[in-house]
Image (cartoon, rainbow, N blue to C red):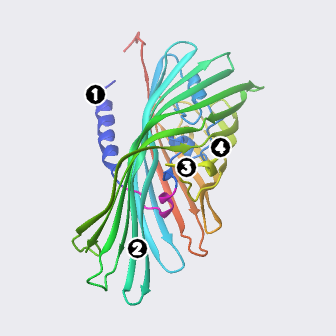
Amino acid sequence: MKIKKLGFIVGLLLLTFGLNAQDINSPYSAYGIGQLYGENISSQLQAMGGISFGVTEKNILNMANPASYGVFDSTTYIFQTGIIGNVSTLQNTELKQNTNYATLSNISMGFQVTKRWHVALGITPYSKVGYSTRVSAKVPPFGSIFNDRFGKGGITRLFFGNAFNITKNLRVGVNINYLFGNTRGYNIVYFPDSLFVFGTKQERYIKVNDFLFDWGIQYDIHLAKDRKLTLGAIYRNAVHVNATRSTISYTLTGGYEGAIENPRDTISYLPDEKGNIYIPETYGFGFSYSQGDRWLVGMEGEWQQWSKFRKFGVADSLENAWRVAVGGAYTPKHTSISPLRKRMTYRIGARYNQTYVRLYGYSINEYAITAGFTFPFKRTRNNITLAMEIGSRGALKDNLVKKTFFNFSLGINIVEHWFYKRKYR
């Protein structure tokens, strides 16, 4: 690999690690295990509505279905990374707030080990927590009472993927995922109008570390004129993820509106409580119909049984979640001497999610339309993809919050030859 290219990758990694420290801001991330990031780590797939279960491309690392690794070329390896960002507006019937953040989408690579065995490995966010809410009331004779709740943190996933080519057209795969990370939650009640009444604060720290497995299968049906129908399905078995929880509650004065917090007396302290978080099973099915590298269209659906979710044996405001997505891609003319506008790949899609959060009798649904462009480099298979989506989550009814968002993703794919000796330079 050339020095300039290596320097570019190192610089990008340093930038994305710095961005990863930023927190999200979503009140719905207070429930379950936070805001889920899913398996669509590739910007190319995000630009097509997130379709992935039935998608296979030699130069894309498609983590959503590990069977897709089976199409990696024998003489190349793929390095993939990127940045995802968000600009949002949160509002209810009374207030409106703007927020934004950017974070690392993934660092991953894939390659062929043998003719029938292909692997991928990397790191990507699994879920993130970031919220800050306040409820206030007037209660005589105490005057104003404020209840502030805020949290931060998240779970990260390391994955080692394996795909096995059973026949020329049939592939199966498994992702061995290691989940690790922690979340912190704070709940404060204080009385700003009463100097002689102590407030209370509870701090809860949860740390997780355990394994999770994703299974996938794909089958290609070759049709006339270089056309192909690919069917794909995924399954994730339910698992009790090992977790440790520490909780402390105490009285305090101050600690609000920038005032210095002065702890008084400890109410309770429960350190290193062992338990687990139940993550339910997932099913998904999708297909894509394509003609070589010219065009592709696809559709998929996914279902998750989050109504069985438990955290240390306690249920949350969750229900079963499902998702449908459609998308496609088109490359006008795929040759190295064509002008850029013809070598670019244009992508579009849409998705609809019923998220796992249910509040005040309402399902918190999300929808988005997506688009993107892939810019190829001349005489190489390297490319940069810009993906965008505009959508909404929640609704302006009762005590709910509506979030309108603009998400963007910048993905880098480096596709290099290895074990390949050039005859001419």
Residue sitting at 44 percent across and 40 percent down?
A: 124
Q: In x, y percent, where is residue 221?
A: 75, 25
Q: Residue furthest bottom?
A: 141
Where is 178 relative to 119, above or below? below
Residue beneath label 4, please? 328
**First of labels 4, 2 by sequence position:** 2
Q: Nearer the viewer, residue 110 or 371?
A: 110
Quick one: SS at disc 2? strand
Q: Which residue is at the front of the view, 132 or 110?
A: 132
Disc assigned to residue 310:
3
Mark 3 or mark 1, which is nearer to you?
Answer: 3
Circle 4 sits in a helix, a strand or a loop, which is it?
A: strand
Residue farthest toward the right in the current orientation of the protein:
224
Mark toward the start of the polypeptide (4 vs 3)? 3
**Hey, what amino acid is under mark 3?**
Arg
**Residue 80 visible:** no
Q: Quadrant of the N terminus?
A: top left
> What amino acid is at disc 4?
Gly
Residue linked to disc 2: 147
103 shown above or below 145? above
Mark 1 element type: helix
Q: Residues within 10 Å of mark 2 (few under 14, many from 20)?
A: some
**Range of the magenta residues?**
23-31
Distance between mark 4 and mark 2 Cα atoms: 47 Å
Residue 146: image quadrant is bottom left
Question: In the image, residue 238 lies at what x, y percent?
Answer: 59, 38
Residue 3 bears which disc, if any? 1
At mark 3, the secondary structure is strand
Tell me the residue at 30%/47% (across/down).
Answer: 18
Query: From mark 4 to mark 3, how far is it between C-alphas?
Result: 37 Å
Q: Residues within 10 Å of mark 4 (few under 14, many from 20)?
A: many
> Quick check: 388 left or right of 248?
right
